[in-house]
Image (cartoon, helix red, strand yellow):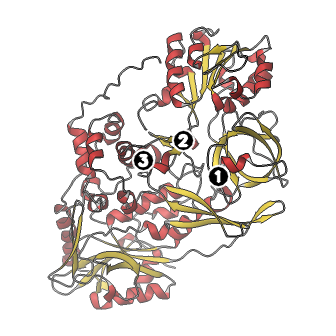
């Protein structure tokens, strides 16, 4: 096996040959998952033909608003990100952890090990690639390894795509998480639409090189490489929002009693949409079930949201009953606590939480509001009086 | 631009979530004691050859009732006798209510022990002031066992305990036995006097101002409702035991016990891993803040 070398450079795959990439991936045992139009939105689903991609579609996003519109061209990747992220394929929202059977001595585990699915993720954007790496830190970087995630992740083949346009809720450029895809892909594509619909392809791994070897390609010209860079620079300049990260952790910690949380709580419905669409929100709950006879019990792991009151329930009731406390928990964990846990923030600037919030609550605006009224000092708490 | 894909850096030696780490081991209930109206104690022995993991006072286990659910419960037995795993809990929830109906011989699941402990080794040579309310005595009983077993290593050992009524006093026989010792200072108070109670009435925090300890060489261990601990911390500070010499045990929702599920977050802290026992000065920025 030849080693992949960085100097291998960039290649061109013609639009007409892109289907061969899917065919090759299938031949290598991958199930391709890619963007498709469904229910007036772009969703990720099993992809067998590139013609099923959202050809000629784009998305127009804003706080609480998402609409598909026709493009003037036949771009395959001429949109940003939809409500779904890739986490559902690597860390499924509902997953059985084990099954046990009742026995005279209590119970015994009934093991049903199955090989992990081998997914090829087609069209992973820079922000979402960063999101997968944040999930790596959560599920495989700690004291305990999530073996199911690790197996799925190790098996996954990643075809990243550079963004040629940014949505108005995007702010990856201000976080350094895009729009140019960073390391961690097997193949990275940049779609060129100038004269001749084609893709600039960069190889990121040995298996990426092996797959590309079976797809018709040629070496990219200097001009094509420059053009690809322009595409990304242009997207970066279109970002509608920014998130200032300097001092963010301390800002949130000293804002625990900031009056702005009350203001957010007047709008927040605590629906949890932001946690569902967030590509890094990872919290889960554990559910126990039995069959009708009560002889077989199962433990399931289900995606959970810090916006539910059950999330913080203890013997004396729920810790976080108010909307204010739940929104504060979400934002403070994502931007501050995450840094204590994983040495990064839990936000990659994809903008999904802004777009899919039914009332358009904007994380970047809320942080800016906290910052605007920040005195640099914790807000003084009234002294405790003895009961 | 290229770097090693992150997945190549992943470790494989750590415990694996899907198999070992999230599967309980079976334990048989070898003894069951009804402590009071809604509080009971179970003693557990492993069904197979597997031994209980050694625990340190303050740690907790996840207890699993077949098909019903799993909850975190602190260990309240003697750390010197780790073969007898002892848990005391109140029947208040969807898991503890069926747990209350367990009989000797029944089998439940156990994962653990998890979490931090009371730093008894580091506190040798000091006065130890234990302040607890209600079932908050349960996670401190292992500490009391250890203090009594190594009594010569400590100066004064003071237990300040508050219960709702005299009938609610947990481990009553044991508390009375400790109270009869000349080398332990035990003060009990109740919220409401019933029957022939002639002892203290009032909040446990009211016992702190006149408790016999030397503040300059004392450490406090607290467990109880959060509001009780807030006022206890304040009363202890008035007596001169600062936040750096005060440890407390926090209760949060826990699902995994492995710092992964996100439920037990408390500001920057993950209570199942960084707690449940915290030193007050490490958490005082968030402790007592509304709904954190």
The verdict on a common chain for dots 1 and 2 is yes
Displayed quadrant of residue B279: top right
Dot 1: what SS?
Answer: strand
Letter of the chain that mark 2 sits on in the rendering: B
Q: Is residue A3 visible?
A: yes
Relative depth, front residue between A129 and B117: B117
Point out which mark residue B70 bears.
1
Q: Is residue B147 shown above or below A105?
A: above
At horizontal 29% and vertical 91% (from top left) the residue drawn is: A16
Left/right placement of residue A67 relative to residue B288 reads: left
Point out which mark residue B252 bears.
2
Q: Where does the image place residue A29, in percent across and percent down from the top left? A: 52, 84
Q: Do the numbered discs 2 and 3 sit on residues whose CB atoms are within 8 Å? A: no
Looking at the image, tell me whether mark 1 or mark 2 is earlier in sequence order. Answer: 1
Displayed quadrant of residue A102: bottom right
Distance from Cα at disc 1 to Cα at disc 3? 26 Å
Q: Where does the image place residue A28, in percent across and percent down from the top left? A: 50, 85
Distance from Cα at disc 1 to Cα at disc 2? 14 Å
Dot 2: what SS?
Answer: loop
């Amino acid at each position: 096996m030849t080693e992949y070398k960085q100097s291998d450079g960039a290649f061109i795959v013609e639009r007409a040959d892109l289907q061969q990439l899917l065919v090759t991936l299938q031949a290598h045992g991958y199930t391709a998952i890619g963007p498709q139009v469904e229910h007036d939105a772009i969703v990720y689903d099993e992809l067998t033909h590139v013609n099923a991609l959202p050809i000629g579609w784009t998305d127009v996003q804003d706080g609480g608003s998402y609409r598909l519109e026709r493009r003037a061209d036949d771009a395959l990747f001429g949109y940003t990100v939809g409500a779904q992220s890739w986490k559902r394929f690597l860390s499924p929202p509902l997953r059985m952890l084990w099954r046990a059977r009742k026995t005279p001595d209590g119970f015994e585990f009934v093991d049903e090990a199955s090989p992990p699915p081998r997914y090829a993720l087609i069209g992973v954007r820079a922000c979402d690639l960063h999101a997968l790496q944040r999930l790596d830190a959560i599920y495989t970087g700690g004291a305990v390894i999530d073996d199911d995630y690790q197996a799925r992740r190790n098996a996954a083949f990643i075809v990243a795509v550079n963004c040629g346009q940014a949505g108005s809720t995007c702010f990856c450029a201000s976080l350094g998480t895009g729009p140019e895809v960073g390391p961690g892909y097997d193949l990275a594509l940049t779609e060129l639409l100038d004269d001749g619909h084609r893709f600039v392809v960069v190889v990121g791994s040995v298996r990426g090189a092996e797959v590309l070897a079976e797809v018709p390609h040629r070496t990219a010209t200097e001009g094509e490489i420059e053009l690809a860079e322009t595409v990304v620079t242009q997207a970066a300049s279109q970002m509608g929002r920014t998130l200032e990260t300097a001092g963010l952790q301390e800002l949130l910690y000293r804002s625990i009693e900031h009056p702005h949380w009350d203001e957010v709580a007047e709008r927040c419905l605590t629906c949890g949409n932001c946690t569902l669409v967030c590509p890094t929100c990872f919290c889960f709950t554990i559910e126990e079930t039995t069959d009708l006879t009560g002889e077989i019990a199962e433990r399931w792991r289900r995606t959970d949201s810090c916006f539910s009151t059950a999330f913080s329930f203890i013997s004396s009731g729920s810790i976080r009953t108010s909307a204010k406390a739940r929104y504060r928990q979400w934002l403070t964990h994502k931007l501050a606590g995450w840094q204590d846990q994983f040495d990064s923030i839990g936000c990659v600037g994809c903008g999904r939480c802004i777009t899919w919030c039914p009332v358009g609550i904007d994380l970047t605006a809320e942080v800016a509001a906290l910052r605007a009224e920040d005195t640099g000092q914790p807000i003084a708490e009234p002294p405790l009086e003895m009961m | 631009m290229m770097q090693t894909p992150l997945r190549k850096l992943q470790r494989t030696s750590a415990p694996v979530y899907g198999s070992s780490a999230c599967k309980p081991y079976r334990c048989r209930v070898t003894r069951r004691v009804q402590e009071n109206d809604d509080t009971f104690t179970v003693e557990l022995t492993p069904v197979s050859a597997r031994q209980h993991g050694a625990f340190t006072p303050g740690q907790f286990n996840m207890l699993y009732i077949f098909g019903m659910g799993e909850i975190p419960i602190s260990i309240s037995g003697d750390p010197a006798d780790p073969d007898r795993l002892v848990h005391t809990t109140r029947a208040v929830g969807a898991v503890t209510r069926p747990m209350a109906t367990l009989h000797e011989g029944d089998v439940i699941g156990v994962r653990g022990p998890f979490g931090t402990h009371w730093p008894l080794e580091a506190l040798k040579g000091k006065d130890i002031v234990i302040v607890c309310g209600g079932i908050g005595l349960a996670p401190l009983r292992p500490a009391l066992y250890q203090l009594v077993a190594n009594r010569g290593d400590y100066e004064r050992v003071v237990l300040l305990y508050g219960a709702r009524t005299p009938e609610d006093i947990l481990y009553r026989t044991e508390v009375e036995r400790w109270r009869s010792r000349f080398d332990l200072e035990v003060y009990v108070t109740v919220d409401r006097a019933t029957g022939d109670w002639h002892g203290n009435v009032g909040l446990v925090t009211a016992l702190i101002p006149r408790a016999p300890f030397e503040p300059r060489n004392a450490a406090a261990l607290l467990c109880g409702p959060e509001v009780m601990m807030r006022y206890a911390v304040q009363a202890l500070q008035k007596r001169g035991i600062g936040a750096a010499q005060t440890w407390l045990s926090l209760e949060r929702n826990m699902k995994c016990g492995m710092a992964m599920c996100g439920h037990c977050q408390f500001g920057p802290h993950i209570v199942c891993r960084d707690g449940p026992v915290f030193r007050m000065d490490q958490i005082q920025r968030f402790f007592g803040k509304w709904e954190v």
